[in-house]
Image (cartoon, rainbow, N blue to C red):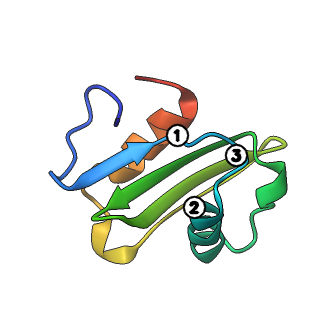
Amino acid sequence: MYPVGVSLPARIRVTRPPLPLAPALRAAAARLCPDAPLDSLDTAALAIAGGAVIGAYLRWDGEEVQFLETGWRGRGIEEALARAVAGES
């Protein structure tokens, strides 16, 4: 579920999947954030629309990266991903 206080488009879901990422989620995260060390993640949050991963916020060893597909930017998804990684609910 997405964090409280964030209004997202109806078909968007933000989730913090368990680590290590399942193969399909790992492939999606690698596509969105190719330079992230997926074997060293401390936390991950993914935005999903219609079954497709459209955004990722990944954190590892004090570093982090966030990516959201261009067509989805500016709809509150970036904030929802950041809140999910921060553990806000």
The residue lying furthest to the front in this view is 23
Query: Three-letter amino acid code at disc 2?
Result: Leu
Q: Mark 1 vs mark 2: which is more N-terminal?
A: 1
Which residue, given by chain and number where applicable, does mark 3 sit on? 59
The circle on residue 16 is 1
Closer to viewer: mark 3 or mark 2: 2
User: Depth check: 10 or 51 in front?
Assistant: 51
Q: Position of residue 37 (x, y in %)?
A: 81, 61
User: Depth check: 37 or 65 in front?
Assistant: 37
Q: Quadrant of residue 15?
A: top left
Mark 1 vs mark 3, CA separation in Å: 12 Å
Residues at discs 1 and 2 in contact (Cβ within 8 Å): no
State whether residue 33 is above or below residue 58.
Answer: below
Query: Three-letter amino acid code at disc 1?
Result: Arg
Q: Mark 1 vs mark 3: which is more N-terminal?
A: 1
Which residue, given by chain and number where applicable, does mark 2 sit on? 25
Residue 8 shown left or right of residue 39 in the figure: left
Query: Three-letter amino acid code at disc 3?
Result: Arg
Q: Residue at x 40, y 51 (%)?
A: 78
Q: Position of residue 17 (x, y in %)?
A: 56, 43
Q: Position of residue 51 (x, y in %)?
A: 34, 64
